Amino acid sequence: MALSELYYWLLTGPHGGHILNMTLERGHLERVIRAIQQLRARFAEPIRIESLADAAGMSLSTFHRQFKAVTAMSPLQYQKQLRLLEGRRLLVSERKNVETAAYANGYESPSQFSREYRRMFGLSPKRDARSTQAGALPPAWPTEG
């Protein structure tokens, strides 16, 4: 009973709106984090953003807005980044070829994978893998001056 009264006074007080917004934002954050976990677990699969929004209990527009507020990118951009990072890991650590890395990460063609890889890392997948395996830092990672 005392707790209910405390909540009432907090929410009806001069800072009630701020307290309510913090509570709502935390709820959105937790739901976006669940969607991120789903994306991370299934990044190589085609995923409908509508199904992520439904799983998060948000409308599509709210989900996009909240997702971008948390990650600074759209859900599709986030998925693409996960795919490219895993592709890079396969190329460098497991010494897979470009085709294997592309198909293993949900790309329909190695050329699409290579184009997006070059945009993200600044080198073609083959050149980046060779330079990284040789011990050189890729251009996407700044060196200390």
Image (tube, rainbow, N blue to C red):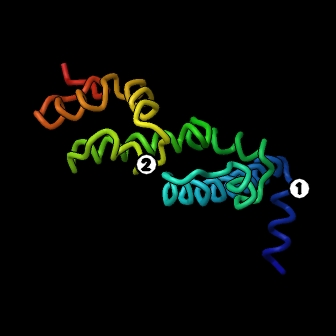
Q: Is residue 135 left or right of residue 48?
A: left
Q: Position of residue 131 (x, y in %)?
A: 17, 29
Q: Residue furthest left?
A: 134
Measuring 81% from the left and 77% from the top, which residue is drawn there? 2
- Comparing marks 2 and 1, which lies closer to the viewer? 2
In the image shown, does 63 or 44 lie closer to the viewer?
A: 44
Q: Quadrant of the N terminus?
A: bottom right
Tag count: 2
Please tell me whether residue 57 is drawn above or below residue 140 in the rendered image.
below
Measuring 72% from the left and 47% from the top, which residue is drawn there? 63
Label 2 crowding class (10 Å Cα cut-off): few <14, some 14-19, many 20+? Answer: many
Amino acid type of the residue tagged 2 in the rendering? Asn
In the image shown, does 63 or 81 lie closer to the viewer?
A: 81
Amino acid type of the residue tagged 1 in the rendering? Thr
Q: Is residue 23 left or right of residue 95?
A: right
Q: Which residue is mark 2?
A: 105
Q: Is residue 42 left or right of residue 53?
A: left
Q: Position of residue 56 (x, y in %)?
A: 70, 58
Q: Which residue is mark 1?
A: 12
Identify the mark nearer the N-term, 2 or 1: 1
Dot 1 lies on which element?
A: helix
Residue 56: assigned label: none
In the image shown, does 129 or 140 lie closer to the viewer?
A: 129
Measuring 28% from the left and 28% from the top, which residue is drawn there? 141
